[in-house]
C-alpha cells in the first residue's frame, strides 16, 4: 500500500482495507456513507481509489476514538461536501463536551473531598416545626431524621423530600412512627447532593453520580472509578489531537 501511495497509483478497495485491517465491504460502506469521496470507476464498473481516499480513511479512523463514530462520520461528510465550517463546528462541540465532562469530574472530586467518611447526625436535635415531635435520635449508629439532617445541611425538609422523589436519597420508614430514617449512606448521599447542587448541577445530573457512589459501596472505592474516569478523559483528549492532525493532513490533500 505504501508503494501505491508514493507513486500515486490507483488503489483497489482491498488496498485500502488491508492497511487498516478492514474488509473491502467496510470500505464500500464508508464511501456510501460519505466518509470517503466518491470513487472513480473502471470501464467494467470496478471502484478505483486514490491517495486522497487513503487520506480520508486515515482521518476518519483517527477521529473516531476522540469524537465517536457518528460525529466522526458527520465531520468527514461535511468536509467531503466542502462544508468545512460545519466540520469545525462539530469538532468544537466535541471539545466543549469534553470540557464539560472535565468540569463535572472536578465538581464530583471536590464534593467528595468536602465530605466526612461517615457523616453522622447530631443527637438531641428536634424535627422542624409542623412535622410533629420526632424522636431525638433514630435507631442505629449515624442514623437521623429529616429535621436534624435538613438543619445540618442548612436546607428545608421539603428539599430533602424533593431529593427523595428524584432518587438522590432513599430513607427508610420507621415501622412504628412512619418517620423517615436516614442511615449513614443516606446522610452521605445528602451531603454529596448538597455539594453538587451548590455547584449548579441539576437533580437529573446528580442522580447518576449518586448511583455511582452507591454502586461503588461508598466514597473510598469510588476513588478508583474517578481515576479511571480521569484517564478516559485524558485518552479522549489525546485522541482528539491525533484526529485533528490527520484531518488537517486530509484537508491539505484536498487543497
Image (spheres, rainbow, N blue to C red):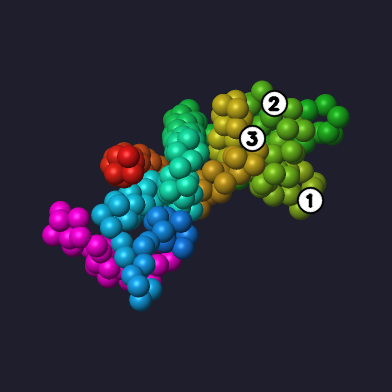
Q: Residue furthest bottom?
A: 44
Q: Is residue 86 visible?
A: yes
For the residues carrying marks 1 and 3, which lies nearer the camera in this image?
Answer: 3
Name the mark on residue 202: 3
**x and y percentages locating residue 154 in the rendered image:** 66, 23
Give the dominant element type of the magenta stretch: helix, strand or loop: helix
> Does the magenta run of residues contain 2?
yes
**x and y percentages locating residue 130 in the rendered image:** 86, 29
- For the image shown, how many numbered marks are present on the structure? 3
Q: Classify residue 91 by image quadrant.
A: top left
User: Could you tell me which quadrant the N terminus lies in?
Assistant: bottom left
- CA distance for labels 2 and 1: 26 Å
- CA distance for labels 3 and 2: 16 Å
Identify residue for label 1: 176
**x and y percentages locating residue 195 in the rendered image:** 56, 29
Viewer-proximal residue, 65 or 184?
65
Identify the element where label 1 is drawn.
Answer: loop
Identify the element where label 3 is drawn.
Answer: loop
User: Could you tell me which quadrant the C terminus lies in?
Assistant: top left
Question: In the image, 23: left or right of 147?
Answer: left
- Residue positioned 64% across, 42% down in the render: 204
Amino acid at each position: 500500500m505504501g508503494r501505491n501511495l508514493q507513486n500515486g497509483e490507483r488503489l483497489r478497495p482491498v488496498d485500502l482495507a488491508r492497511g487498516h485491517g478492514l474488509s473491502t465491504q467496510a470500505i464500500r460502506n464508508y464511501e456510501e456513507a460519505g466518509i470517503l469521496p466518491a470513487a472513480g470507476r473502471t470501464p467494467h464498473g470496478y471502484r478505483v481509489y486514490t491517495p486522497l481516499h487513503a487520506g480520508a480513511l486515515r482521518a476518519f479512523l483517527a477521529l473516531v476514538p476522540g469524537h465517536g463514530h457518528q460525529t466522526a462520520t458527520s465531520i468527514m461528510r461535511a468536509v467531503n461536501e466542502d462544508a468545512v465550517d460545519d466540520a469545525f463546528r462539530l469538532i468544537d462541540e466535541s471539545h466543549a463536551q469534553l470540557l464539560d465532562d472535565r468540569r463535572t469530574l472536578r465538581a464530583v472530586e471536590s464534593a467528595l473531598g468536602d465530605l466526612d467518611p461517615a457523616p453522622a447526625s447530631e443527637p438531641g436535635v428536634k424535627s422542624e416545626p409542623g412535622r410533629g415531635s420526632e424522636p431525638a435520635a433514630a435507631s442505629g449508629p449515624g442514623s437521623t431524621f429529616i429535621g436534624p439532617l435538613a438543619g445540618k445541611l442548612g436546607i428545608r425538609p421539603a428539599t430533602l423530600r424533593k431529593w427523595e422523589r428524584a432518587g438522590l436519597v432513599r430513607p427508610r420508614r420507621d415501622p412504628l412512627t412512619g418517620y423517615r430514617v436516614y442511615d449513614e449512606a443516606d446522610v452521605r448521599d445528602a451531603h454529596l447532593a448538597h455539594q453538587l447542587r451548590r455547584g449548579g448541577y441539576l437533580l437529573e445530573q446528580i442522580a447518576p453520580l449518586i448511583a455511582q457512589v452507591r454502586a461503588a459501596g461508598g466514597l473510598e472505592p469510588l476513588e478508583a472509578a474517578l481515576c479511571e474516569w480521569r484517564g478516559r478523559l485524558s485518552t479522549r483528549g489525546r485522541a482528539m489531537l491525533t484526529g485533528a492532525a490527520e484531518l488537517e493532513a486530509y484537508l491539505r490533500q484536498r487543497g
